[in-house]
Amino acid sequence: MRLPRTPPLSSVVVLLLLVALGVLLSISGVVDKDVAGVFYEQGQGFPAWQNHTVAALRLSTRITAYGIGCFLIFAVCWRVLLQRPLFGLSRAAVVYLMAVFLLGPGLLVNGVLKEYWGRARPSQVVEFGGDKEYTLPLHPADQCAHNCSFVSGEASLGFAFMAFGFVAVTRRRRRLGFAVGLGLGSAFGLLRIAQGGHFLSDVFFAGVFMFAFAWLLHRLFMQRWVLDRLHLSARDRRGP
């Protein structure tokens, strides 16, 4: 009988640090304001908002969204027409990825949280030249009526790429999938922080929510009752 593998010490340390950061961001606004303050200049606001280079980099988030949409549609057509997986992605994996991107960044983040959480953006709060009150990330507020700060939509899109790590068939590809998702989400989030569009906590919890959402959907899509209703066989569940 094989004993379960013990997680590496480095992984445990990283996890503890992330938990500590999450707790700190949840109970105090000091880190949020300090990080936003790095990009703020008195009398000028957030200069990155007017920076053409930063604006061009932000455009990459939309290109990424269109790109993943085209890729998943192409993967479906490839599977239907040629009856072969694209890059080793089974039908179940393609359906799962579509669900993560559509229901995660699309519905959960932009359709629910950003519309109803009511958190003001950094550029809107009093500390940075606005007239709104800073509120903690996990506390619903009334400082914003539409397209609010919590959580970051662009960062959520980037972090959603971690879903590729869940469907990868080799350890190397799993690590690559998670690394790409973390890298894209962090980069997209940093751009928005620099522009005064989001606090660090908006980006941090976007990553937490997207990882948890992708993990949960992966668990659900691996259950027989979900696959049966999608007419996906056990072979598709395991992949090629």
Image: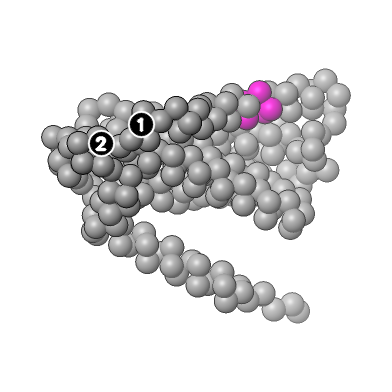
Q: Nearer the viewer, residue 87 or 203?
A: 203
Q: Residue at x 40, y 30 (%)?
A: 51
For mark 2, give the secondary structure. loop
The quarter of the rendered structure image containing the C terminus is top right
Residue 214 seen = no
Q: Nearer the viewer, residue 237 or 128?
A: 128
Q: Is residue 127 magenta?
A: no
Q: Where are the magenta residues, as a range?
A: 68-72
For mark 1, give the secondary structure. helix
Q: Nearer the viewer, residue 126 or 82?
A: 126
Where is residue 100? Give x, y as percent: 55, 37
Mark-to-mark CA distance, 1 and 2? 9 Å
Q: Residue at x 62, y 52 (%)?
A: 179
The quarter of the rendered structure image containing the N terminus is bottom right
Residue 237 seen = yes
Tell me which secondary structure the magenta stretch mostly adopts.
helix
Type of the residue with mark 2: Gly
Q: Residue at x 65, y 44 (%)?
A: 164
The residue labelled by disc 1 is 49
Classify 37 as above or below 110.
below
Which circle marks residue 137 in the picture?
Answer: none
Where is residue 31? Give x, y as percent: 29, 57
The residue labelled by disc 2 is 45
Classify 194 as above or below 169.
above
Tag 1 and tag 2, C-beta contact below 8 Å: yes
